[in-house]
Amino acid sequence: MFSTLAKKTAARLPHEWQQALKRRHFQRHIARDTFRTDEPEWELAARWLAPGDWAIDVGANIGHYSKRFSDLVGAGGRVIAFEPVPATFELLAANAARFAWTNVTLLNLAASDATGVVGMTIPDFDTGLKNYYGAALTTTPTDLQVLACAIDSLHLPGAVRLLKIDAEGHDAVVVHGARALIARDRPTIVIESISGEIRAMLTTLGYQEETVKGSSNAIYRHPST
């Protein structure tokens, strides 16, 4: 009850104050090494990444997976983190500044299948706070407009070993915009949406689907890796 009351109170605070409270909260978790997610793929990332590897975090949000990837690939590796929502990106940047390694490239972009400006919607929690975890791209006009680009348009020089996608229903478009990279590097792919369209695209590229007990994500791995 107190937690709900505290959240309703926080919802009445100016945006800058809300952001400051969140920064302090995440700062404490990073310092205590408790900055993580309960998704089993967070732990499993150690099977797929090694020092020197490259990884991509689409829908990085505040950076739980980005930090995990950063720790695993170390100083010689690289993490590319996509987060299109400005308020969330601000927190991601503040958190990344406290990571052990300076190996995370932060992109205030939405991963998509083309370069362009797109709208985003951000739902509200019952407490009145914004649900930034549920932020999603939309084709309808919105007040929040963000820049989108295809992962393939970056022409990344490093071999990407892990691609995590959490794009709130936009996942298939992200995969379509990364087909060349996927065909080149055959990374392990952790993806939130499980759809026939995604299965068809990745099956064509030789991927096999796996699931982990207790997770709503799908894991796609290529037999050659």
Image (cartoon, rainbow, N blue to C red):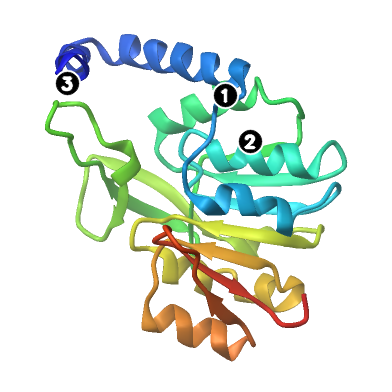
Type of amino acid under label 2: Lys
Between the residue at mark 1 and the residue at mark 2, the CA separation in whole angstroms equals 9 Å
Quarter of the image with the C terminus is: bottom right
Give neighbour class at mark 2: few <14, some 14-19, many 20+ (Cα, 10 Å): many
Q: Position of residue 32 (x, y in %)?
A: 60, 17
Q: Which residue is mark 1?
A: 95
Q: Which residue is mark 2?
A: 67
Q: Identify the residue at horizontal 47%, vertical 82% (top origin).
A: 199
Q: Which residue is mark 3?
A: 4
Seen from the viewer's position, the closer of residues 177 and 204 is: 204
Quarter of the image with the N terminus is: top left
Q: Earlier in the sequence, mark 1 or mark 3?
A: 3
Q: Position of residue 31 (x, y in %)?
A: 62, 15
Between the residue at mark 3 and the residue at mark 2, the CA separation in whole angstroms equals 28 Å
Q: Which is in the foreground here, disc 1 or disc 3? A: 3
- Residue 166: name its quadrant: bottom left
Seen from the viewer's position, the closer of residues 13 and 36 is: 36
